[in-house]
Image: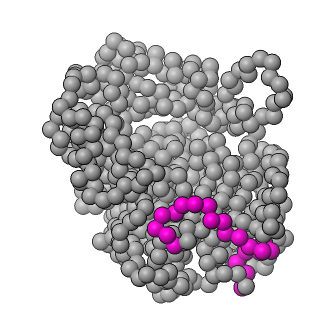
């Protein structure tokens, strides 16, 4: 399928490359890099060269766009205006806002961001009687003139005393209850935590509780999945109110489709499909498994070899070898003698690393050039990937700090390092750094959908520059069951029901609430928005989508500025309407298509 609209690059001059390090240099093999390093106006003052001697304190200066330091005058002003606005609403008794003596006691500022439209967004965590209310946030939106134009979220009523009255259990008591439920080892590098919170139970009632987090990504037993478990324990009775695993993966749950982990003791020899190739141009001489000939930016080492480390994009993009251990750790470099990666004489294990590195570099460029974001945190965050995780591991996952790619088992999947999988998993980091969508219920389905949307966007973006990359509406199809040649995939955004697991319409949500399966609702809404088409379940048609680039900008803006950790599908509809209104106007064709696409998937 051909997408009519082409990528428009921002008119920003590239910054100078980083200063060369002794005995090591970053080596881009093509001069066609569109953007490298920090954009002008998006870096902090500390990135600017200063005299050797400072005679007076340097004032805190906020960037033109992106995250503002909370202590900066501009951020402090925006926070105060937001609290004043909330106080006026509270005093007026407006719907959804509980009257109270001080709005400043009901919220705590989390972040302040200024966007490319000149708007400022203040994200506020809710608290009650000095105790954090888990997952609840408000976001105020300041217009160009510095006045609060609107606010996302509501302050629902919480019973008096839930925060200040004594509780019967201690944090350690709650931890013991959660550890019994967890029933396994926890990582030494990520110690357990137990925090006093107020949380809504499954019935929607507020309860005094402890939020316990337990992580296990190391020393996993056979067929076990990595876990970042969140438990909520009633602070009086010890009842386990609810729990969820914040760590997902590209693969479906173990009891559906193919297994998550193989049981054999040695790494499989994957048999991915032969990637289409095209004549190399310039130094595009690295051979990938899935994306044809590519151009990797690497680093020359002191011994004359090259390693997969790119120092030209933000704070870096690096790919390491996990050496088929269950835990991706250490910094085992993947090296090459002549900086021509994936050639016939190279170790076969190198090719999966080529794709992972290319995927991370492409995702960084996509975030920068299409979405206007400087990596995950919008401050150039380093992108770290590990390949060859575990043995016969049919999965890939983001663990909160880095990417982890399995080699597949050579039957159900080849190495899970395709462009859309890389984009999908790295996008989980983007969601964590923005809306923080909780990986449970409707927000969990949206979390997965946003990763599918971004992953598909990365594949589309690459196809604009690399003729070997074929853009489609499938997720993970290049790595999935490579031997059967049918082009089947993990998920299908144009028809989510095709996988026999996912749903494409909200009316079926009660039947499928698992996050990978429910992601089909928003996946299909995005497909209809960008491409146009018909929802299989409702039969409703959306004529003439707005194109990939506009669709991606709308969904990203909604994620970054209008969604909160507990956003539902209905609230996501409104978030995307707000984003499209900001970008294209309230009466625009784009807003009309956003509303039509959500209506088609049963979200009104």
Q: Residue furthest bottom?
A: 484
Question: In front here: 92 or 238?
Answer: 238
Residue drawn at 55 percent across, 71 percent down: 323
Instruction: Say which residue appears at 52% left-offset and 63% top-offset.
Output: 328
How many numbered circles does the render carry? 0
In the picture, measured across the screen, residue 7 lies left or right of residue 416, that is right
Quarter-wise, where is residue 280 in the image?
bottom right
**Residue 494 visible (yes or no):** no
Which is nearer the eye, 303 or 416? 303
* Residue 230 image point, x, y percent: 33, 48
Residue at horizontal 46 percent and vertical 84 percent from the top = 411
Q: Nearer the viewer, residue 569 or 269?
A: 269
User: Relative to 135, is 120 on the left or the right?
Assistant: right
Q: Residue 342 magenta-drawn? A: yes
Relative height, residue 221 to residue 312 (above, below): below
List x then y, in percent, for residue 566: 36, 42
Residue drawn at 73 percent across, 44 percent down: 38
Q: Quadrant of residue 509?
A: bottom left
Q: Is residue 582 above or below residue 467?
A: above
| Quarter of the image where the N terminus is located | bottom right
Which of the 4 image quadrants contains residue 235? top left
Question: Magenta residues?
Answer: 324-344
The picture places residue 482, in percent across and down from the top left corner, at 51, 83
Viewer-nearest residue: 486 or 218: 218
Would residue 75 appear left or right of 135 to someone viewing this image? right
Q: Residue extending furthest left?
A: 237
Q: Is 119 drawn above or below residue 214 in the view shown?
A: above
Principal SS element in the magenta part? Answer: loop
């Amino acid at each position: 399928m051909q997408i009519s609209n082409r990528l428009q690059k921002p008119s920003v001059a590239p910054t100078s490359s980083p200063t060369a390090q002794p005995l090591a240099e970053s080596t881009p093999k093509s001069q066609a890099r569109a953007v490298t390093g920090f954009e002008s106006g998006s870096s902090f003052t500390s990135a600017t060269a200063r005299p050797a001697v400072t005679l007076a304190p340097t004032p805190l200066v906020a960037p033109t766009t992106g995250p503002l330091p909370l202590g900066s005058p501009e951020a402090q002003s925006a926070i105060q205006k937001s609290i004043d606005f909330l106080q006026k609403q509270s005093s007026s008794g407006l719907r959804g806002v509980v009257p109270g003596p001080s709005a400043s006691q009901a919220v705590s500022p989390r972040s302040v961001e200024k966007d490319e439209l000149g708007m400022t967004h203040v994200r506020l965590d809710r608290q009650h009687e000095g105790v954090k209310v888990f997952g609840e946030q408000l976001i105020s939106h300041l217009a160009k003139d510095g006045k609060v134009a609107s606010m996302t979220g509501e302050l629902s009523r919480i019973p008096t005393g839930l925060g200040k009255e004594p509780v019967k259990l201690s944090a350690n008591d709650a931890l013991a209850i959660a550890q019994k439920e967890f029933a396994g080892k926890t990582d030494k590098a990520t110690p357990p935590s137990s925090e006093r919170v107020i949380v809504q139970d499954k019935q929607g009632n507020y309860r005094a509780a402890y939020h316990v987090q337990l992580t296990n990504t190391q020393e996993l037993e056979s067929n076990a999945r990595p876990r970042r478990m969140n438990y909520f324990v009633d602070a009086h009775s010890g009842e386990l109110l609810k729990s969820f695993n914040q760590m997902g993966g590209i693969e479906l749950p173990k009891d559906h489709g193919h297994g998550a982990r193989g049981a054999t003791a040695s790494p499989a020899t994957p048999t991915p499909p032969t990637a289409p190739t095209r004549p190399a141009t310039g130094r595009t001489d690295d051979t990938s498994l899935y994306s044809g000939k590519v151009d990797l930016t690497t680093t020359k080492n002191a011994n004359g070899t090259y390693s997969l480390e790119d120092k030209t994009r933000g704070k870096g993009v690096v790919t390491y070898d996990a050496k088929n251990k269950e835990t991706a750790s250490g910094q085992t470099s993947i090296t090459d003698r002549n900086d021509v990666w994936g050639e016939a004489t190279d170790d076969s294990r190198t090719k999966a690393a080529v794709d992972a590195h290319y995927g991370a570099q492409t995702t960084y460029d996509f975030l920068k050039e299409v979405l206007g974001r400087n990596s995950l945190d919008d401050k150039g965050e380093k992108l770290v990937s590990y390949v060859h995780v575990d043995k016969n591991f049919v999965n890939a996952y983001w663990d909160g700090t880095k990417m982890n790619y399995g080699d597949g088992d050579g039957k159900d999947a080849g190495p899970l390092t395709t462009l859309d999988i890389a984009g999908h998993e790295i996008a989980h980091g983007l969601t964590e750094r923005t809306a923080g969508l909780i990986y449970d219920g409707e927000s969990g389905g949206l979390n997965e959908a946003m990763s599918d949307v971004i992953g598909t966007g990365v594949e589309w973006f690459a196809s604009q520059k690399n003729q070997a990359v074929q853009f489609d509406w499938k997720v993970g199809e290049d790595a999935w069951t490579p031997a059967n040649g049918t082009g089947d995939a993990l998920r299908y955004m144009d028809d989510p029901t095709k996988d026999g697991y996912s749903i494409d319409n909200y009316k079926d949500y009660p039947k499928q609430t698992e996050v990978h399966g429910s992601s089909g609702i928003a996946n299909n809404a995005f497909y209809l928005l960008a491409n146009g088409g018909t929802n299989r379940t409702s039969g409703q048609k959306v004529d003439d989508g707005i194109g990939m680039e506009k669709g991606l900008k709308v969904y990203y803006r909604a994620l970054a500025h209008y969604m909160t950790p507990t956003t539902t599908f209905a609230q996501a509809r409104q978030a995307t309407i707000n984003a499209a209104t900001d970008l294209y106007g309230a009466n625009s064709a784009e807003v009309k298509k956003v509303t039509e696409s959500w209506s088609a998937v049963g979200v009104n």
